[in-house]
Image (tube, helix red, strand yellow):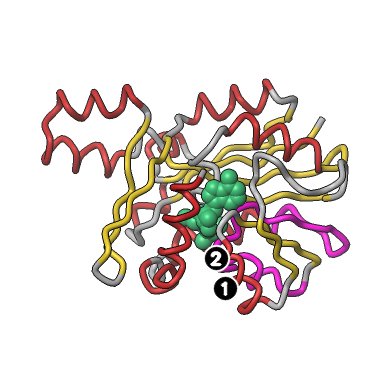
Amino acid sequence: MKRVINYYNTLAREYDRIYRNMEYMRAVEYKVVKNEIKKDYLILDVGCGTGEHLVYLRDFNTVGLDISIEMARRARDKSGKFVVVGDGQHLPFKSRSFHCVISFFGALNHGDIERVFKEIRRVLVKGGIFIFTVANLYDLKWIVKSLLRRGWRDTLKAMKRRRGDIRKVIDGRRIKVNTRFYSLGEVENLLRKHNFHIKYTFATSITNSPLDNLLYKTFLKYLGGYIGAVAVKK
Ligand SMILES: C[S@@+](CC[C@H](N)C(=O)[O-])C[C@H]1O[C@@H](n2cnc3c(N)ncnc32)[C@H](O)[C@@H]1O
């Protein structure tokens, strides 16, 4: 995880500026979370980044966790909430501590997702809610772009690998991290394997195109940029 930590420690400085225009994605995330949580819930945000959701949920009891100390520091400063530096694969909490765990926009794209699912299941109370999004393997916008840039052979190759890189330049320094893509079917299978009941799945997108509104819970969700689920610990 060293590369992941280094990548996000460097990105932390510019994260809020780079990702400031994702109103549509945030609106979907907020809507999904607000529909599921109750006032007395204790909520854990795994991979809280700079604290987007901790700030949004300021009136709720929340704890943030991030593997990057620079992200965690910003999240704490922005939200005033308790933020832990830790790895979603080894959560530093007692079993059955939280009523809800959220994890949005890529925190689960690195590392062993099954290990994270196991840990999240462990720290949730019975009937507790798990809400998350991951990068979609069948992101239509990415597929079209890739076909135009690389052609169908390389696009298919990249899709078969289910892995790719995210690259950024921060203060003139190139940084890169490996990321994993998932299909909605794969996510559903993993949730079932780890004994979650799937309430529903949904999709969203980092762009603000009005067409993205068609993704949320329709059959087009299979083609969204980010796919997610609301799942309940059985
Ligand atoms: C793209 S950011 C998303 C941040 C935030 N959830 C949001 O929606 O803006 C991904 C975050 O996940 C964190 N992360 C990646 N792998 C992690 C892991 N195994 N455990 C905890 N945090 C992790 C990164 O440090 C980064 O802050």
In-front residue for pair 35/48: 48
How dense is the environment of label 1, judged by Cα within 10 Å: few (below 14), some, or many (20 and up)?
some
Q: Which mark is residue 57?
A: none
Q: Which residue is painted at 39% across and 56% down in the image?
A: 206
How dense is the environment of label 2, judged by Cα within 10 Å: few (below 14), some, or many (20 and up)?
many
Relative to 127, say whether 10 is above or below: below
In-front residue for pair 4/45: 4
Percent across and percent down for residue 187 are 55, 30
| Amino acid type, callout 2 | Met
**Could you tell me which secondary element the residue under label 2 belongs to?**
helix
Mark 1 in CB contact with mark 2 (< 8 angstroms): yes
Please give left or right for residue 133 compared with residue 3 in the image. right
Q: Is mark 2 within 8 Å of ligand 1?
A: yes
Percent across and percent down for residue 174 are 27, 58
- The residue at which mark 2 appears reads as 71
Percent across and percent down for residue 192 are 67, 23
- Tell me the distance, in whole angstroms, between the alpha carbons under discs 1 and 2: 5 Å
Res. 191 in view: yes
| Amino acid type, callout 1 | Arg
In which quadrant of the rendered view does residue 138 lie? top left
Which span of residues is magenta-colored?
34-59
Q: Is residue 39 inside the magenta stretch?
A: yes
- The residue at which mark 1 appears reads as 74
Relative to 105, say whether 60 is above or below: below
Q: Is mark 1 within 8 Å of ligand 1?
A: no
Q: Which residue is painted at 88% across and 62% down in the image?
A: 40
- The C terminus: image quadrant: top right
Relative to 193, say whether 181 is above or below: below
Please give left or right for residue 48 compared with residue 178 in the image. right
Q: Which residue is painted at 30% across and 27% down in the image?
A: 159
Q: Which residue is painted at 49% across and 30% down in the image?
A: 184
